[in-house]
Amino acid sequence: MMQALLQKRLGDEFQVESAGIRQGCAGQTANEHSILCMQERGIDLTKHQSRWVGDLNLTQYSHIICVGDNEARQVSEHLPQNSRTIVLIANGDHGGVPNPFEKGLPAYRGCLALLDEVMPEIAQLVR
């Protein structure tokens, strides 16, 4: 959801990509609740396929944006020391973006609401 929201906000002049920290989830489609939440926004996630961060050359990206401390730690293990700054979104009062997986549609909508709240700041940082 974060990838799609940020891509929409930044437009075609930027390429936003997504990867996760669970290697076993690579190749899976988006969760049905993510698909539904984004369909409500007119964004189609049905073709999304997850990737594992360890399969990517992270040094090619100008920004690496993580949803929480745990994710940031795991992503940093795939980066040469001090090669890129990892940005933690919603770090302030929220402590990151909670993972809504297996918590039902209301949790996905709550996650999306928090992403909406922080997305202007993230987009400004990327620009």
Image (cartoon, rainbow, N blue to C red):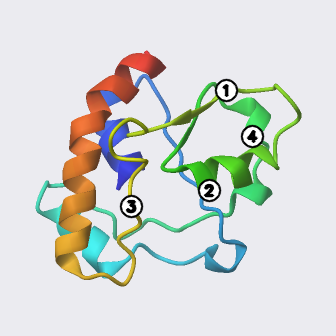
Q: Quadrant of the C terminus?
A: top left
Residue 10's place in the image compared with 18, above or below, is above
Nearer to me, 91 or 83: 91
Mark 1 sits on what residue?
85
The residues tagged by marks 4 and 2 sit, at their Cα atoms, a distance apart of 17 Å
**Residue contact at pointers 1 and 2, CB within 8 angstroms:** no
Numbered disc in front, either 3 or 1: 3
Q: Which mark is residue 6?
A: none
Q: Could you tell which of marks 3 and 4 lies nearer the N-terminus? A: 4
Mark 4 sits on what residue?
58
Q: Secondary structure at mark 4?
A: helix
Numbered disc in front, either 1 or 2: 2
- For the point 79% across and 43% down, the residue is 57
Q: Secondary structure at mark 1?
A: loop
Numbered disc in front, either 1 or 4: 1
**Residue contact at pointers 3 and 1, CB within 8 angstroms:** no
The residues tagged by marks 1 and 2 sit, at their Cα atoms, a distance apart of 15 Å
The residues tagged by marks 3 and 4 sit, at their Cα atoms, a distance apart of 23 Å
- For the point 16% across and 73% down, the residue is 106
Residue 89's place in the image compared with 123, above or below, is below
Mark 2 sits on what residue?
70
The residues tagged by marks 1 and 4 sit, at their Cα atoms, a distance apart of 11 Å
Q: In which image quadrant can residue 41 be found?
A: bottom left
Q: Could you tell which of marks 3 and 1 lies nearer the N-terminus? A: 1
Q: Which mark is residue 98?
A: 3
